[in-house]
Image (cartoon, grey):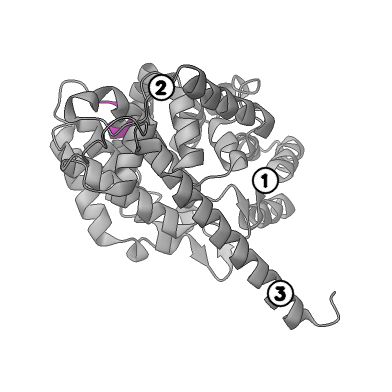
Amino acid sequence: MPREPAGWLLAVARRRAIDRLRRAGTEWRKAPLLVVPEASEPAAPVPEDIPDERLRLLCTACHPALSREAQVALTLRVVGGLTTTEIARAFLVSEATMGQRISRAKRKIRDAAIPYTVPDADELPPRLAGVRAVIYLIFTEGHTASTGARLQRVELQYEAIRLATLLYDRLPTDAENAGLLALLLLTAARSPARWRRGRPVPLAEQDRGLWNADHVARGRALVAEQMSRPVVGPYLVQAAIAAVHAEAPSYAATDWRRIVGLYDVLIDATQDPVARLNRAVARMEQGDVAMALSDVEALAGTLAGFSHFHAAHGEILARLDRTADAAIALDIAIELTDNEPLRRQLVGRRAQL
């Protein structure tokens, strides 16, 4: 304990503020390098169809000459402002691995002399998947912070919603743009109910009267409008899952069978292991606990470093009255969790067992 705690906190806060200002200044100085052509070329006009500066930067940085993974990781780092640690957690890889990927992407840009100019309208389509992924992952970090003392970073959630809204307004006929916006709105709608008396509140215990009714209404309307299409993409399917939760008057009244069916569609399209984990949880809530356990244990090799995997594994084991095994799974989840509110929640659940 410092001799003068108040003075110590003030000094740390002042230094933190200076660090943030310096970082912001560096970002603003470097940002034009993404969009300004070589000095020998005339300056490219800013397309009127991408009026927002940050959205232009996202569209510019998601260059099709890079792999999708490299596009997203580099754009999150340079434009999104996320740290390498936060990006690594989003990709379920180590910080060292993600740092190497970002460095390789930078080298490729340099060595191949990839021109970073604002794309014209006909150059946008091959970049849209990367742009959507960046917006989604910014929101994900805002929904549940990967590290620190805050459960969620609401400012990141609403910046992602703002960008998704601009993208949808620019290309409203793209079903995945609508799906992304709907997904973010329906998920962010629960934010006011996720924190009570200094602790996180799981979905099963949330007061649904606190959910943002405007977000829910707009998200559900977007899903209803788009789901009649013959082919739907991953963001729209995830939005449909969120809409099922939003439609239920209570957690107990949730249509888990429908949610499992939507996860089947999502997994067929993406083979995403996190979607498989979420389907297992839905099967547990549906009452098919034995199949849920089989599904989760099949993911052990893929998601061993993912705290939510071990937390879900522990809950499923607890439903089967395998208390000792459930406690071991929760111990691993606690060890892997760097978000303090979530860690406290897991410690509390472990104590219950």
Could you give the CA–CA distance between mark 1 and mark 2, rounded to whole angstroms? 38 Å
Q: Around disc 1, counting alpha carbons within 10 Å, would you say few (fewer than 14), some (14 to 19), or many (20 or more)? A: some
Q: Which residue is mark 3?
A: 11
Seen at 59% across and 47% down, the residue is 146
Label 3 crowding class (10 Å Cα cut-off): few <14, some 14-19, many 20+? few
Q: Is residue 35 left or right of residue 226?
A: right
Amino acid under disc 2: Ile
Residue 323 on image: x %, y %:
72, 40
The residue identified by callout 2 is: 114
Is residue 128 or residue 58 the one in the foreground? 58
* Mark pair 1, 3: CA separation: 29 Å
Magenta highlight range: 232-236
Q: Is residue 233 magenta?
A: yes
Mark 2 secondary-structure assignment: loop
Q: Position of residue 198 (x, y in %)?
A: 58, 68
Residue marked by disc 1: 337
For this rendering, which residue is in front, 123 or 255?
Answer: 123
Which residue is located at x 39 percent, y 18 percent? 65
Q: Which of these two is toward me, 23 or 306?
A: 23
